[in-house]
Image (cartoon, rainbow, N blue to C red):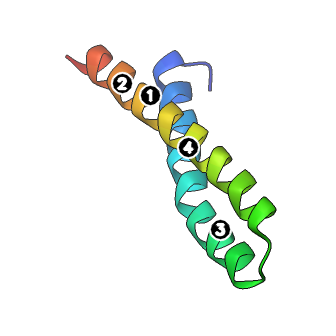
Amino acid sequence: MRDKDYNLICVLEASLKNAYQLVQYIEDAKAAGDDELAEWFSKIQHNSLKAGEQGKRMLASRLS
């Protein structure tokens, strides 16, 4: 589908889903004693959350 708002919603969903899934990956890495991997996952999670927040703001402005 070639719809900019639909695309925004898809990317927003993917970003927030990724951030949610990374919670488990971070816990798994910490449980395995791999702090480097846990930190890397945490950085990716931060970026996904940031993208999600930006996406929510953009979607809200387009719906109003």
Q: Are marks 3 and 2 in contact (CB under 8 Å)?
A: no
Residue at image coords 38%, 19%: 58
* Residue tagged 1: 55
* Residue tagged 3: 26
Residue type, label 4 = His
In the picture, measured across the screen, residue 32 lies left or right of residue 13, that is right
Residue at image coords 59%, 45%: 14
Q: Position of residue 13 (x, y in %)?
A: 51, 44
Q: Nearer the viewer, residue 18 or 6?
A: 18
* Residue tagged 2: 59
Residue type, label 2 = Leu
Local secondary structure at mark 3: helix
From what the image shows, is residue 14 above or below residue 51?
below
Residue type, label 3 = Ile
Q: Using a 10 Å C-alpha cutoff, classify the residue at mark 2 as few (fewer than 14 neighbours), some (14 to 19) or many (20 or more).
A: some
Q: Quadrant of the image for the C terminus?
A: top left
Q: How many marks?
A: 4
Q: Of the two numbered discs 4 and 3 on the same chain, state the one appearing first in sequence.
A: 3
Residue type, label 1 = Gly
Label 1 and label 3: CA atoms lie apart by: 24 Å
Residue at image coords 36%, 24%: 59
Q: Are marks 4 and 3 in contact (CB under 8 Å)?
A: no
Q: Are marks 2 and 1 in contact (CB under 8 Å)?
A: yes
Q: Of the two numbered discs 4 and 1 on the same chain, state the one appearing first in sequence.
A: 4
* Residue tagged 4: 46
